[in-house]
Image (tube, grey):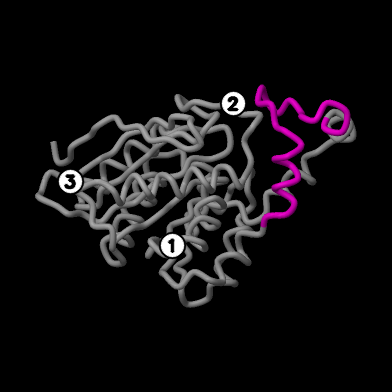
């Protein structure tokens, strides 16, 4: 084993969040990153992308925390209470947990996220000076636009009358929709001075690759853009997965 893996928990507003901390086996303190999952996802993500990434990062010397937002996966709370502000707050508490661990170098902290987790990572990094490097995988640049494009008249009526909509078995609240319309992570990152890696699949049908180009255009030379040819939204092939993890590992080693 080239890493140590342990189950962890921390709290936000009295609710427990569960996850895993992956530590290099070498003596610390270590640089560290937190991984943020996507909409309706969890600390594993499709084809075990998050465990594979966390183990690769830890084997390369970068400790990694992966966890479930409140209301998702194993964590306490209800999904219908989820908002972008609430998940951003969860991410700040995850960084609190990371920086409090004796094995972690609190001056060498990074953050990354997949899909909606990328949006949350961007919002978190813009308001947390502890974050020195940021990676965004297939990131959402504006969730409100995606909601608007995919919302039928029936769904709008449901949100208006019931205060929520059934989105593939997830109870999405009117509060989350309103949050999505008002949140602009690309603009938020104007205050972030660290380096950023943006990776996106050219064939992403869930979050168009144009979202990645928006982040790059805003960040300029502070960002490195990697478009994986033919890759889908969650990089679901061994080749895409390997390229994504290897490129991100190199980025973290160079910038933390």
Locate the C terminus by quadrant. bottom left
Q: Is residue 47 visible?
A: no
Q: Residue furthest bottom?
A: 221
Look at 55% across and 29% down and name the residue there.
Answer: 71
Determine whether label 1 and label 3 are within 8 Å by CB. no
Residue sitting at x 59%, y 26%: 78
Q: Earlier in the sequence, mark 1 or mark 2?
A: 2
Question: Which quadrant holds residue 49?
Answer: top left
**Vertical placement of residue 64 versus 157, above or below:** below
Q: Which residues are magenta?
A: 159-183
Mark toward the start of the polypeptide (1 vs 3): 3
Callout in the foreground (2, 3): 2
Tell which of 127 and 256 is nearer to you: 127
Query: How far across and down, in percent of the image, does residue 86 sit?
Result: 58, 42
Q: Position of residue 130 (x, y in %)?
A: 38, 61
Element class at badge 3: strand
Q: Which residue is mark 1?
A: 197
Q: Secondary structure at mark 1?
A: strand
| 25 horizontally vs 191: left or right | left
Q: Nearer the viewer, mark 1 or mark 3?
A: 3
Q: Would you call the spot at circle 1 few (<14 residues within 10 Å), some (14-19), or many (20 or more)?
A: many
| Label 1, label 3: how far apart the Cα atoms are | 22 Å
| Marks 2 and 3, how far apart at CA | 33 Å
Q: Which residue is mark 3?
A: 24
């Amino acid at each position: 084993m080239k890493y140590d893996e342990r189950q962890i928990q921390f709290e936000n507003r009295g609710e427990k969040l569960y996850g895993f901390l992956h530590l290099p086996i070498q003596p610390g303190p270590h640089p560290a990153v937190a991984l943020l999952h996507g909409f309706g996802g969890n600390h594993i993500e499709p084809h075990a992308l998050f465990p594979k990434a966390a183990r690769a990062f830890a084997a390369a010397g970068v400790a990694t925390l992966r966890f479930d937002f409140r209301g998702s996966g194993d964590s306490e709370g209800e999904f219908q209470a989820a908002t972008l502000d609430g998940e951003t707050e969860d991410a700040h508490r995850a960084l609190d947990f990371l920086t409090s661990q004796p094995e972690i170098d609190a001056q060498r902290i990074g953050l990354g996220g997949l899909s909606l987790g990328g949006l949350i990572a961007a919002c978190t990094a813009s308001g947390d000076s502890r974050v020195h490097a940021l990676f965004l995988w297939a990131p959402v640049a504006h969730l409100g636009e995606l909601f608007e494009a995919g919302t039928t008249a029936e769904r709008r009526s449901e949100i208006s009358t019931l205060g929520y909509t059934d989105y593939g078995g997830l109870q999405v609240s009117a509060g989350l929709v309103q949050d999505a319309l008002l949140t602009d992570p690309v603009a938020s990152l104007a205050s972030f001075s660290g380096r950023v890696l943006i990776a996106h699949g050219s064939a992403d049908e869930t979050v168009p690759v144009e979202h990645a180009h928006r982040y790059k255009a805003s960040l300029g030379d502070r960002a490195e853009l990697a478009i994986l040819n033919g890759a889908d939204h969650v990089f679901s092939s061994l080749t895409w997965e390997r390229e994504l993890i290897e490129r991100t590992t190199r980025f973290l080693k160079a910038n933390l």
